[in-house]
Image: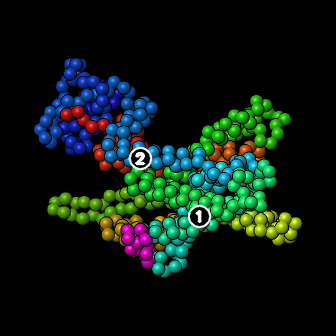
Amino acid sequence: MKDFATAITFGGQEIAERNWENCPTSRITGFSAVAEGKFPTVQPRGPTGKSLIFVFSARHPRCPFWHMFEKLRIVFTIPELRKKVLLTIGLLAVYRIGFHIPLPMVATNLGESSGGAADFFERVSMFAASDLRQATIFGLGIMPYISASIIFQLLGSVYKPLEELKKEGEAGRKKLNEYTRYLTVAICLVQSYMYLKFMLMAGGPGGFGNINPNFLNAEGTGLFWGWQIVAVLVMTCGTVFLMWLGEQIDEYGIGNGISLLIMAGILAQMPKALYELIRNMKPQLTGLSRGQVGIETLILLVLLFVCVVFGVVFITLGQRKIPTQSAKFTRGRRVYGGTRQFLPLRINQAGVMPIIFASSLLMIPGVFFGFMAGLFETDSSLFRWLNMIGLSMQDQSSYFFNLLYVALIFFFCYFWTAITFNPKEMSDNLKESGTFIPGYRPGKRTTDYLEKVMVRITYVGAAFLGLIAIVPTIVYGSLGVPYSIAGFYGGTGLLIAVSVAFDLVQKIDSHLVMRNYRGLLEGAGGGTSPVV
């Protein structure tokens, strides 16, 4: 719409010819041009026979900011959608409040007292929707639940009863979720105990690690056993509560609950990353020490941020369109079908799950070997050997760590795609709808072709995820910036945040489209309801 006259002509010529539900009402907000007598009266009739007076907005419909704010306004004018959005925001706020409630026996910040372990905690916290550097009631985050989900996904491919349980539909899914919760509690008990032992072994004031001396036993050699049980139960209950929050978002809110918790944890690190960037920034090109950010480094970080965002959006939205053609059939005197369409296959079919799974598995060996090393004397060979393995699994700049990280990402990309993508089912659906892929007979040949195409494009998606995953390590090692900056401004954190946000926008978009609104993802000129 370039002016009101165009809008009036558009409405007068086309609205009467269209269905009432599909009438283009994108210009309807503001004042009545008809009432003021500036333009000819246009009153097409709806299905009820009522005359419709169209009111046109004086605001320019092509302004992207106005379009965005208008869509947000529409979201909050729909009661059901408004309730879902506000509930989701409220539950995420509860999740963040829990990170300011520390365990009663903790005396210091782990990121400050653990030396080189701080960077490891930084990385793990990004994927766990937690902050391991501060021992709070949500210290373990959602990582135990993710680990339990990984175990059942792997077992479901090799253990026949679990595979049969997956095929039972909704009842089977509920049973699997119940088993996952039980395993989550077991993992929480083990991880919280190991985490507590780490706090006891870490250096801190008075030689008591990070534990408040008032909670030590009578000998002063460790935490009183009763308080150990309390700490383990509190952290376990914290993770179970986060798991419940995610399920409530799934059922009553909008979006994927667990993914939103992880995204909220990543975005919560943004203010600190900006603060670290500003604090370490020096307006000079030479004479910089490690950790300081000069002008050249700042420019590289900005360019890297833009490139990563562009790449993430490209891969997230990227599709391989396979041409399809529907068979012709006659009904009465009309001929239907025969049209050429496309079957879209996502390049990154697995999404961010491979990175989350790979990070979860990489966390376990480092923590386990570090815990085992603490059981031996510091001057023993077993301590040195176990400690060396534990440190190598936590050293993000080592070749071994990054090669293993990329290999796990490739594995989980193909593994998750094999679980979520069923070429035989897709081939059967095409056959039942009378659609086929030109050059391939319906049935086995179509199935083999779809599987071959998905294997090829999954390789591209896995390679991109692997590259994105090691970008923070490259930035951290080559530019010497703190990992809090490198991890957020170039890599997996940004990938997860963008992917989850895009998925959330798509879900909101589907709610708007169902109510005859144009979605958030469409261009300027989204519709509003007509004024009757």
Q: Position of residue 421 (x, y in %)?
A: 47, 66
Going by the picture, which residue comes out furthest to the front?
218
Going by the picture, which residue comes out furthest to the left?
49
Going by the picture, which residue comes out furthest to the bottom?
160
Secondary structure character of the magenta stretch overall: helix
Left or right, 445 with reference to 151: left
Q: What is the magenta range?
A: 164-175
Taking depth in this image into account, of 255 and 108 the one nearest to the observer is: 108
Left or right, 413 with reference to 528: right
Is residue 353 visible in this depiction of the protein? no
SS class, disc 1: helix
Say if the magenta span includes residue 172.
yes
Taking depth in this image into account, of 475 and 394 the one nearest to the observer is: 394
SS class, disc 2: helix
How crowded pointer 2 is (Cα within 10 Å; few <14, some 14-19, many 20+) is rated as: some
> Sequence order check: which comes first, mark 1 or mark 2?
2
Q: Residue 371, relative to residue 314: is it above or below?
A: below
| Quarter of the image with the C terminus in it | top left
Q: Which residue is mark 2?
A: 87
Quarter assignment of residue 239: bottom right
- Amino acid on which disc 2 is placed: Leu
